[in-house]
Image: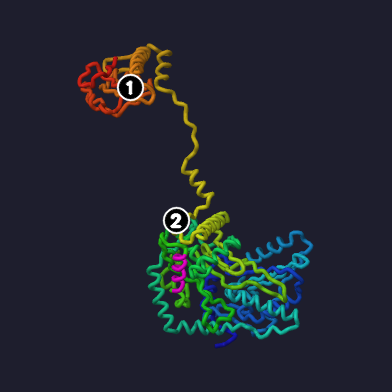
Amino acid sequence: MDAQDLPLNGSQLGIWLADQVAENKQAYVIAHCIEVRGALQPELLSRAIQRGLAEADTVTARYVQAETGARQQLHAQGAMDAVAAPLEFDLRRHADARQQAEAWMRADMAEPFDLSSAQHCYRQALFQIGSDHWLWYQRFHHIMLDGFSFLALTRRIAAHYTALATNADAGPSPFSPVSVAVEEYEAYQRSDTLERDRAFWAGFCETLPPAASLSLRNAPPSGQVRSLAWELSDAAALVLQRHALDAGLAVPDLLHGLLAAYLYRMTGQKRQAIGMPFMRRMGSRAINALAPMVNVLPLAVEMEGGMDWFAVSRTFRASAKAIRPHQRYEAEQIQRDAGLVGTGRKLYGALVNFKMFDYRLELAGLQGTTHHLATGPVDDLEFNLQVGEGISIELRADAARYEDVELKRHAARLEGMLEQWLAAPQRELQALLPATDEERNDIAQWSQGPAVAAPEVDRLSAMLARQAAARPDAVALVCGGATLRFGELAGRVAQLARLLCEHGAGPGRVVAVAIPRSVESVVAMLAVLGVRCSVPAAGPGLPGRPRCHDVRGCCACAVVVHRCGRNCPAGRHRAP
């Protein structure tokens, strides 16, 4: 195999193919900004950057399409002429120096690298924004590095800087050549292990739950990313560590359980397909190779409402453990085998990424703080976990599917669920309240409907009195051959109302009416309503045959009946 002209390994090939068809190629970049305070020597850092990059075979390589497929053409390791000098900017005279530097970085990340060109697909820049305040910006195409090797290369550059500043030797390059990673990949492609892994994933995908998204927008990936991060308080971190120790789990286990539980509570789907990156470096001869080797694979996490925090966390850990022996099988090949390519269906919804790296950096005694700017493409929603001196959770989402306000709401809900489980880790999953206090108040207000003032309603007796005074001779009631005018109707109603009052009728009392439909039944009903009594649900029966026995036992203070009086309870009153 020609060491200067190699095929790509599995991860590189996947990135190459995705980059070729992507509309937004700037998604396939990784970028950091390292903040340093102190007497940094920029000329030494510039030399250290060049020395470090010269040792990075995948960074100085060219990536081309040949007749035999995509290839990487390597320069001799240590060739300084293949490395571009970093850009330097002195912004100390500007009051908004940091803002200008960050704006430059954003603009640079918006410009895609073209792998097919002869130009370098990386960028290094150093900004001096104060007398002893520096920002070191690094950006690479993802085909060159993954998160693990990015950090390894940054540390190597820091070691070169320290050696230059102290007149020491940085030692030999710690990096394995990319050829080792390629050889391992090709050997796996010819192995029986590949066939066993293929069979495993074929069976796994048959029962894989559908990918669940927290987005309400069915938009294709835009290549633009929104992000939001927060750090747990020291008090919360201490409680979290104590719970992990008591349960025999690690802090990342509990955070994985929290995120899986959140997806369950937000979607109602107890079986979740969750993406998780696997490094594929442990136990490999290529552990120190710079080429990307990460493989994002789906986990099938099945939860029940009665589980507590510890049970969910153990379930997540067991799901990851089941996948680990088969992590070398390419995710892109899993999709092809399952017939998902071109269907719009995905292997997983949200992605959970525990960054187990220590990002602390030292440059000849100066401390560097790493700020993550870009970590590659995000198809939907990604949760990044970092556990070190502090514990932080970062949400990264595709900008076409999530707004900034939505990320803030997800972060607030997650914090609320974390607080509930920190206070009571045995609390059942189904009892967790994902909604924030503000959302619960909104729901309570929405459930009540708009506040409407009670309308002013005239009583029927008042309306009758007004009509009798204004139009006493106008026809008010017609029943068969009988006709009553308003004056007459009001007089008869008033007469019966006085009689009812004499016998105890009044507000809150019951007066039964057992009269067939007639003029008298209307007079009786209006009189009862006039004295503010209620009428029991006792039907008058067929015309001419009042069913007076229906009103026995209704606790009525009076019963109004027709003059016939047949079958009426004794001692009651007939309608006038």
Residue placed under numbered mark 2 in the picture: 431
Magenta stretch: residue 534 in it?
Answer: no
Q: Position of residue 31 (x, y in %)?
A: 63, 69
The chief SS type of the magenta part is: helix
Q: Quadrant of residue 340?
A: bottom left
Residue 341 in view: no
367 vs 24, left or right, is: right
Q: Quadrant of residue 32?
A: bottom right
Q: Amino acid at mark 2?
A: Ala
Question: Relative to 98, is 43 above or below?
Answer: below
Residue 37 in view: yes
Q: Nearer the viewer, residue 161 or 144?
A: 161
498 vs 176, left or right, is: left
Q: Nearer the viewer, residue 473 or 115?
A: 473
Residue placed under numbered mark 1 in the picture: 525
Specify the segment rendered in magenta: 310-321
Near mark 2 (Cα within 10 A), the count class, few <14, some 14-19 or many ≥20, is few
Question: Residue shown at 59%/61% (left/top)?
Answer: 235
Question: Relative to 171, is 137 above or below?
Answer: above
Q: Position of residue 207 (x, y in %)?
A: 38, 68
Q: Considering the image in quadrants, where does the N terminus appear?
A: bottom right
Disc on res. 485: none
Q: Position of residue 550 (x, y in %)?
A: 24, 27
- Total tally of numbered discs in the picture: 2
Label 1 sits on a secondary structure element that is helix
First reached walking from the N terminus: tag 1 or tag 2: 2
